[in-house]
Amino acid sequence: MSSMEISRRARAGLRIWLALLLMSLSSACGDDTRPTEQDYQHMVEVFGGRAQTNEQEPDYGPPITNSFYLIMRDGVRIAVDVHLPQKIALGQVQELAPAILRPTRYWRAVDLRGPLNRLRGPSLFREFFCGSGYAVVDVDVRGSGASFGLQLHPWSSDEVLDYGEVMDWIVAQPWSNGRIAASGASYVGTAAEFCSILGHPALKAVLPRFSLYDVYTDIAFPGGVFNEWFVRRWGELNNDLDANRLPEESSFLARLAALGVAPVEPDGDGPSGRELLAQAVAGHADNLDIYAASRGVTYRDDVADEAGTDVDGFSPHTFLGETQRNDVAVYAWGGWFDGAYAASLLHRFASLDSPRRAVIGPWNHGGGKHVSPYQDQNKETDPSPLVQLMEQRRFLDYWLKGHGDMPAQEIVYYTMGEETWKRSPVWPPEGAVMRALRLSPGHSLAWNDTNHVGVDEYVVDFTAGSGPLNRWRTQLSRSDVAYPDRAEADRKLLVYESAPLPADLEITGTPVADLWITSTATDGHFFAYLEDVAPDETVRYLSEGMLRALHRKISDDVPPYVLNGPYHTFLRADGEQLTPGKPARLRFAMLPLSALVRQGHRIRLAIAGHDADQFARLPDAEAPIIRVLWGGEHASRLELPIIPR
């Protein structure tokens, strides 16, 4: 094992250990959940709305937690933790509580050893919302954590029906005001979104944060390219958690502190909580092996035998009609460098006509780190986690408590390079225009047609990669996202570059790569990277896109949700192999962004045939020779969404 790999594992283990310590000590950190006047001011600066003060900041006391099993319609026991505001639980205020439901795949609570377990306090989320008069309901979804049952595939119909039964239980409680929101990040965010398809009368709002909308394109097969590293590692993580094991990268200290998922102690006689936990964990042995199932998938409509469905069977976009009919308010959160989840957010926002709002920040997965390439990598997240929670509370206060003004239907977004927050009711923002940079002689990009015709040859380098801190890895580690060596990495790629910009250029929206190619192979993966080259030759990564050549057909059909860019169905009926030596057009959307490229900088397009750090290799045979055609009838180009300044 290399020293770099050892260091990476040590850092990952340290993060887990620190997280456990923070969980243990958070009860002593209650002041961290009390907003200051500066917090209120910053919230209004970023998110808009009326000015507020902390003079009437609510204080319902710390959470009081109760754990138990709920029995579902088919007899499966589901582990639930209910965290109630102290003053409501003890009857110290004559007030009922709205509830926030969080169904998780990743253990609703950790069982810590000895005194650490007794010291364990609430998370920032629970402490903040319980202190604001909300009940927080955490659930181990069917087939995970301390819950019984099987996970046949993510967000199965049985799992989603369980959400409805938990909501039934919530509204029947004497402390409930009859209104519920579902919220969460990643898997939990998608679960929250699935709550909206049920038509439950108590569900008024959902906050899907840093979560997918289309399983196939947003995470598993972006551009039809198998995201092998993520799917394999996510499968391994799930296998560990389902077996009540700490993940492989957990440090010795983490293993010393944590026993696994927290059990549920039953009332009355019968098996103990640990005996019930052992029974539940034993039942998880037959859960879906997500990596094995995914390896048999090429097309969107392929049915993996292990899962018994295609990926659209558990993808939120498939149920857009149900979501529309149920008219649940949606507040989506995302980060520019969180895989493809900013695109997920924009597709959702454009497709819904129910009350909606969205935020895209300069963030990694979860919004815990500020990862704009124009800022110091160690910069604190902006706004702070507390201010983010304050904004989410303002949204929920309106929909669940009837307080304040109706939140504006808009996208709040951050322009990197300018390092400024902005707001727009539409996307792309009003005034955006698409401008094309054409591939031209001398590996250049030109705004105007040069009337030249040519071709550039490239032998695919299967050692090329995007590094260990790329945007597709943060979903598992919530680590920084950084591309510090793009100048070096680009030496392995086919590169085209513009002249220095005569003025600042704001790119806000979804770029499109439009390439004419030939290949010596019948299929292949094609990657396009959008980069900013500074006068000192520093190369900053801005965005990327990819397409498997097999899926290159552009469909005239109406897509299942609103897209920015060409529509590829990824269906088996539309698959078409390359004919070696015959020109083929690859036109595909890149990932959205908002960035200001300064005067004197240059725009770079770097083309690759593989990402060794993240995606599956294709083909397995010797490296194909790619020829990129430009000019004339084969005019390859890079289309950029520009905001006039």
Image (cartoon, rainbow, N blue to C red):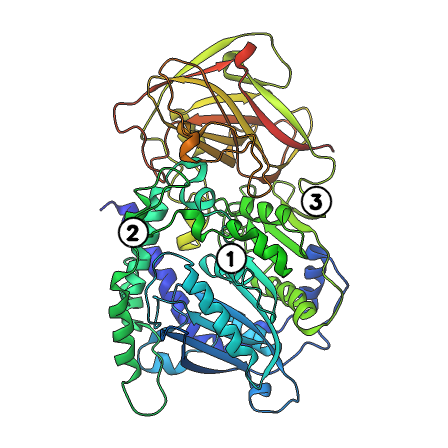
Name the element at disc 2: loop
Q: Is residue 246 visible?
A: no
Query: Which percent across, then down, holds residue 217?
Result: 46, 42
Task: Residue at 54%, 57% (x, y): give it.
Answer: 209
Whether 247 is drawn above or below 483: the answer is below
Name the element at disc 3: loop
Residues under labels 1 and 3: Cα distance? 26 Å
| Residue highlighted by disc 2 | 306
Task: Residue at 54%, 47% (x, y): give it.
Answer: 344
- Amino acid type assigned to the residue bearing label 3 in the image: Val
| Residue highlighted by disc 1 | 368
Query: Which percent across, then down, holds residue 72?
Result: 41, 74
Q: Of callouts 1 and 2, which one flags the residue occurring earlier in the amino acid sequence?
A: 2
Whether 589 is drawn above or below 7: the answer is above
Q: As drawn, which residue projects farthest toward the top?
A: 452
Residues under labels 1 and 2: Cα distance? 35 Å
Is the residue marked by circle 3 packed among few (<14), some (14-19), or many (20+) residues within 10 Å? few
Q: Of callouts 3 and 2, which one flags the residue occurring earlier in the amino acid sequence?
A: 2
Residues under labels 3 and 2: Cα distance? 41 Å
- Amino acid type assigned to the residue bearing label 1 in the image: Gly
Whether 599 is drawn above or below 279: the answer is above
For the residue pair 499 and 164, the one nearer the viewer reads as 164
- Amino acid type assigned to the residue bearing label 2 in the image: Glu
